[in-house]
Amino acid sequence: MDLGLSGKVALVTGSHRGTGQVIAERLASEGATVIAHGLEEGSADHVVEGSKVEYAVWGDIRNEAGSEIVAKQALAVSGRVDILINNYGMAENGSWASASTHDWLSMYQVNVLSAVRMVGLLKEAMIDAGGGRIIQLGTIGSTQPNARRPHYYAAKGALANVTVSLAKELAGTGITVNTVSPGFIRTPEVEAGFRAKAKRKGWGESWYEIETHIVAERFPNPVGRIATREEVADLVCFLSSARAGFINGQNIRVDGGAIDIVH
């Protein structure tokens, strides 16, 4: 299926590593001109060196000044941004008892306001260009949180709410706005964490054995495994395309059909 992304310019925040890097590389492989991003100068350069991604920019989008730096660099190297992927975000451990006001505010800066700032800086140019795509990276915890990390899940819930509001704000502009909300993703960090846990609990050494326990104890779902980064990236690519033009204001779960998560 040709997604028609050739000639489109995509900025993927937080794409210097992890799922964001895979999203950037996948978009580039579909023909988009992709701009990778990291918080610090040079932090996303390796993405350009090792893939079809063409540009790398930097800036701390947790604040106004850094966000402006990113937007200016992106527009300078490409002339425009057709697709904004607000991938940057971070979970933080904590509980209702331990999370301070500062912790709550930090999670909103990282997971909500970073995206809001980038939208504010780039949406007018997208409107002037006649359309575009804005995609937020969320989590299934935005609608199905648990007791742990309440500040993180609250922030991601706010991000999903922002998506709906923004879709309505941009009605008639040709810009669609959607959230992609994965469950567990097999990133190197997640795999390393579960392998360490498997060693402590005697789950076995093969990923198949370990994943069986993950599904049974942490992430029950009918597919019986956790997502790959590539599966998340493929959905982002589709939502970025003209073929997804009538999908708007949605929070789409990538969770294998999970209904109730116990963790």
Image: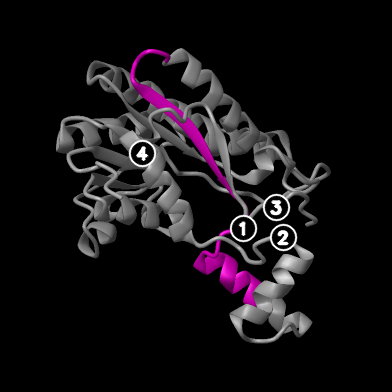
**Residue 119 image position (x, y, % from top left):** 40, 26
Query: Label 3 vs label 4: CA separation?
Result: 25 Å
> Which span is picked out in magenta?
171-195
The reply to whether discs 2 and 4 touch (Cβ–Cβ < 8 Å) is: no
Query: Label 2 vs label 4: CA separation?
Result: 28 Å
The residue under label 4 is 240
**Residue 84 image position (x, y, % from top left):** 35, 35
**Amino acid of disc 3:** Ala
Q: Answer with left or right where residue 158 lies relative to residue 134.
A: right
Q: Earlier in the sequence, mark 2 or mark 4?
A: 2
Query: Label 1 vs label 2: CA separation?
Result: 8 Å
Q: Earlier in the sequence, mark 1 or mark 2?
A: 1
Label 4, secondary structure: give it. helix
Q: Is residue 218 above or below residue 93?
A: below
Considering depth in this image, is 154 or 183 the residue closer to the camera?
A: 183
The reply to whether discs 1 and 4 touch (Cβ–Cβ < 8 Å) is: no
Q: Which mark, residue 219? A: 2
Considering depth in this image, is 259 or 115 the residue closer to the camera?
A: 259
Q: Does the rendering let one see residue 196?
A: no
Q: Residue at x 67, y 77 (%)?
A: 210
Q: Answer with left or right where residue 190 lies relative to residue 247.
A: right
**Amino acid of disc 1:** Phe
Q: Which mark, residue 184? A: 1
The residue under label 3 is 258
Say few, some or many: other residues with alpha carbon within 10 Å of mark 2 (under 14 / 14 to 19 / 20 or more). Answer: many
Considering depth in this image, is 10 or 101 the residue closer to the camera?
A: 10
Q: Earlier in the sequence, mark 1 or mark 3?
A: 1
Considering depth in this image, is 250 or 71 the residue closer to the camera?
A: 250
Q: Depth-wise, is mark 1 or mark 4 nearer the camera? A: 4
Label 2, secondary structure: give it. loop
